[in-house]
Image: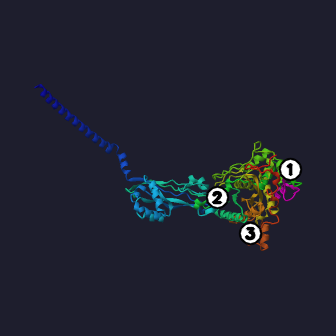
Amino acid sequence: MNAPRRNRNRSQFNLRTRMLMVGAGLGLCAVTLVGRAAYVQLVNSDFYQRQGEARYLREVPIATSRGMITDRNGEPVAVSTPVASVWVNPQELLRAPERIPELAQALSLPVDELTAKLTQKADKEFLYLRRRMNPDVAAQIVALKIPGVFSQREFRRYYPQGEALAHVLGFTNIDDHGQEGLELAFDDWLRGKPGAKKVIRDRKGAIVESIDLVRPAEPGKDLTLSIDRRIQFLAMRELRNAVVENKAAGGSVVIMDVATGEVLAMANLPTYNPNAISGASADARRNRAVTDLVEPGSTMKPLTVATALQNHLVTPDTQIDTNPGYLTLGRYTIRDVPRNNGVLDVTGVITRSSNIGAAKIAARIPDRTFYDSVRAFGYGVAPHSGFPGESTGVVPVPGSAGWYGTTKTTMSYGYGLSVTPLQIAQAYSALANGGRVIQPTFVKGQHNEARQVIEPGVAREVVRMMETVVTQGGAKGAAILGYHVAGKTGTARKNGPRGYEQGHYNLLFAGVVPATNPRFAAVIVVNDPQGGKYYGGQVSAPVFHSVMEGTLRLMDVPPDDIQSWLAAQAAGKVGNAAVLPVAPDPTDAGGADIDAATEFDAAMPTARAPQPAVQEVRQ
């Protein structure tokens, strides 16, 4: 009788407890749900609003244009043009495989190739199909309404001057970032800041509506160069003519304003088309005027003379005995070719380009004084022009492993050191600028502070000496009617794996005009001519004549040799505006500037073992 009663009481107790527990649990769930709803709707509503919007609201970039580059006269030389890039959502298109052949035909791609690309990116939502297209063509492709195919606006760099300014400007990559030349040097200045905006996209990725501007696009800043495109074209044309005529491997031209350091032209061959960079080799893209080293040959002699004059070791009238036409240096011999010049004054050493005369002048200069002077002119020091990759050159240091008993002697006439064409132009600008070295620049109006390296009177005296090279020496081909021209030729044997190579030369001419009141300095280098002419006076001096004759006209520089100008006009040889070209004297053929062709052979080791990049005579 008692057992049934206990079971009934337990059942009643358990049912009540269970009901209470279930009720409490349901109540707790209800409170939790209400609390959670209140938290989501009231406390953390912004977060969930953003999460919801992320399902259909996107932030997309706004493309911006790169700054324009102009020459010194405001003519555009690098501009950004709008283009379009076609892209696809592979996931969307793969759901409609029957449209792939139509898309492949529109893009001029093989169907198999396009299918493979889509398959490889099947887990992605973005794939470029074609970059930098004509916007009209891209619009035609998008108009086909192929699932997942869209376009976006971009910009592409265009260079109106083509290969003429390729080495100066460089180029940009597919994302419009500077890769070489001034495009790289001033990339931060030229590159704009992309903007951003919020848009609503549908489930297929297409933009339905623009909602808000997050930040506006900032276009890049414009850049005005010191380059004059007219002079640049002239320099490129005349250099190309010389390279073709003399079957040369290449060459360089640099023209500087001596007072400001502004580079007016810099041309190189071989060159390339920056609008079609894919077809250009690395060798063609190299700016040889800034990166390639050459031994300056006899263009070094005016600096040697300037150093001696500055230190009062010689005067213009000092007599230098170059007899008997050769000078023995230990086991080696230096010669003056083609003749024994006898006794010369210092001016005659420059006029006749006497290696012996330069060597004997250098012998009077202390080693460290000579080295410091060469460095002061900018040799062995980076020009700091702002151009990426510029070389410092190589100048041996007295007392170092690279300085030997005859190093200073060979350096005095242009061997044993290596420089760039830009450095030579900078040094000659210093001679023309009253002995003040100024840092070269490619930006108009960016005038750097000049540094006095020799006295103004010494600089003027050396320029006067260099005039005789054009009027009496081996550079008659550089003469310009109506203007006093001062310059120096150079012929430097090229250094190869086995030492100096027979029949391979760099031919140079460096000069300033007008000599009485210099405005411009120019350097011409022709690399490895094989046309039968092997002297700077034959090949490079006429290029200087043609380029600088045009430059003087374009820059409205009045003649400083009025007598010859009026005499030519009276004889009916020139009109009111024309100038009479002066042809090279075939009987002179560079004459005394045969400095590297033969006279250095005897000063070089006969064994052609592998030599360093800078070759020098060793005791």
| Residue 347 appears in the figure | yes
Q: Would residue 539 be found to the left or right of residue 47 on screen?
A: right
Residue 348, quarter of picture = bottom right
**Which numbered tag is attached to residue 579?**
3
- In the image, residue 336 lies in the stretch drawn in magenta: yes
Residue 583, quarter of picture = bottom right
Residue 460, quarter of picture = bottom right
Helix, strand or loop at disc 2? Answer: helix
- Label 3 is placed on what type of residue? Val
Location of the N terminus (image quadrant)? top left
The crowd level at tag 1 (other Cα within 10 Å; few <14, some 14-19, many 20+) is few
Helix, strand or loop at disc 1? Answer: strand
**Which numbered tag is attached to residue 284?**
2
x, y percentage for residue 151? Answer: 45, 60
Looking at the picture, does residue 616 appear above or below residue 583?
A: above
Helix, strand or loop at disc 3? Answer: loop
Q: CB atoms at circles 3 and 2 under 8 Å apart?
A: no
Image: magenta residue range? 331-353
- In the image, residue 117 lies in the stretch drawn in magenta: no
Kindly identify the residue that appears in the image at 20 percent across and 32 percent down: 17
- Label 2 is placed on what type of residue? Ala
